[in-house]
Structure formats: structure tokens, C-alpha cells
Image (spheres, rainbow, N blue to C red):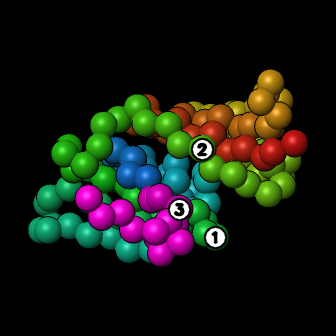
Amino acid sequence: MYLMSPSKITMKSPTPILRIFDEEKAKEFYLEFLEFAVDWEHRFEDCLPLYLQISYNDCVIHLSEHYGDCCPGAAIRIEVGNLEQLHANLISKKFKYARPGIETTPWNTREVRIGDPFGNRIVFFENL
């Protein structure tokens, strides 16, 4: 069996795919509340499920209404700089479905945990 030398292999950050069920709720949560931007949207036809890419700086996430792409209830961790400012921005919006706090963990991070409207969990964290 032939194995490539690790020095010839490069990997970049993965792009998570999160399941969504309602375009309006997804956009309210991810675009208005979390302030991600839509990079692109795709549908095979007007009345078919939506697949889109959103981003915030270098953080890229795919959202999908397609049942076969992923299961609801996923969890992702996103490392951020200035967790205090992110938290202050989120709390200032008085979003009726999420008022996250900041937690200091035994594994030396500070974290803001938020559940999206579809059962997915997002943990924004900063290393101590």
C-alpha cells in the first residue's frame, strides 16, 4: 500500500452543514441575530429546499433544508476573538428566543452557547 508523505497533504478548516426547516427563521437567527452574511443561495427549482452558505469573517457555515444532507441537533464550536464584545452585541439585541450567558469552563475556555431554532447548538469560545 502506498501512503503519501504528510508534508504533501494540506487540510483547511471544515465547513459544517446545519439542518434548517424554515428559511425565514433561519435568516432571522443567523443573519439578524448572529450577524452572518449570505454568500450564496441555491435551489434546484423555486419550490424546492434551500441550500445556502453564510459567513462571518473567516467562519463559513452551510445551512440546508435538504433532509439527506445532515441531521438536526448538530453541535459546532467556533473560536472567536473578543468573546465579551460578541456577548454584549447578542444581549443588546434582546432577541426573544436567546439570551445567552458566558461560562468559564474547566478546560480553560470562556463560552457563549446558543441553540438555533432547529435544535443545532453553537458554542462560541475563547481560550483563556
Residue at the spot of label 1: 57
Identity of the residue furthest to the front in this view: 1
- Alpha carbon separation for disc pair 2 and 1: 15 Å
Number of numbered labels in the structure image:
3
Please tell me whether residue 68 is drawn above or below residue 103 in the rendered image: below
Mark drawn on residue 77 = 2
Residue at the spot of label 3: 13
Which residue appears at 30% of the width and 64% of the height?
Answer: 2
Q: Decide: few, some or many residues near mark 3? Use Cα within 10 Å; few <14, some 14-19, many ≥20.
A: few
Please give left or right for residue 33 compared with residue 50 in the image.
right
Is residue 47 something that shows in the picture?
yes
Identify which amino acid the numbered label 2 is placed on: Arg
Q: Decide: few, some or many residues near mark 2? Use Cα within 10 Å; few <14, some 14-19, many ≥20.
A: few
Please give left or right for residue 65 compared with residue 84 in the image.
left
Q: Does the segment drawn in magenta span residue 12? A: yes
Q: Does the segment drawn in magenta span residue 59? A: no
Which residue appears at 33% of the width and 70% of the height?
Answer: 41
Identify which amino acid the numbered label 3 is placed on: Ser
